[in-house]
Amino acid sequence: MLDLLANKWSALAIGALEEGPQRFGALQRRLQGVSPKVLTQTLRRLEDHGLLDRTVYPAVPLHVEYALTVLGESAAVPLNRLRAWVEDNVDEAVAAPAQPALPPS
């Protein structure tokens, strides 16, 4: 589960779905830089682990929406806090000089 949630696209998809159900195209536009293949894989993994629901509406063309489950909503809380921390500290982290590796003890 940690591997899944630590994945960049998983964390960003969960964050995007915090605002409510969304279609694939809307998610792809929101997550700039993600390929359709990677987004599909990410959404499937999140669904397989119970973090989101995929609802298919029988229409022409087919209408599919993705939404967070209760488990997904609970995962969104710490991920949101982590994103906020990154945004607050990214400039400082980028500006920090590289630290030399410590010798083995």
Image (spheres, rainbow, N blue to C red):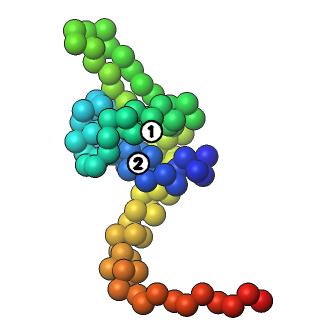
Compared with 24, 30 (above or below) is below
Residue 50 drawn at (x, y percent):
55, 33
Q: Is residue 57 visible?
A: yes
Label 2: element kind: helix
Element type at marker 1? helix
Mark identifier at residue 78: none
- In the image shown, does 61 or 98 lie closer to the viewer? 98
Q: Is residue 6 above or below residue 34?
A: below
Q: Residue at x 32, y 35 (%)?
A: 36
x, y (%) of residue 68? 43, 36
Q: Residues within 10 Å of mark 2 (few under 14, many from 20)?
A: some
Residue situated in front as seen by the camera: 55 or 60: 60
Task: Please say if the residues under marks 1 and 2 sit with CB atoms less than 8 Å apart.
Answer: yes
- Separation of disc 1 and disc 2 at Cα? 7 Å
Q: Amino acid at mark 1?
A: Thr
Q: Position of residue 26 (x, y in %)?
A: 24, 36
Which residue is denoted by mark 2 in the rendering?
9
Q: Which residue is mark 1?
A: 42
Q: Nearer the viewer, residue 12 or 20?
A: 12
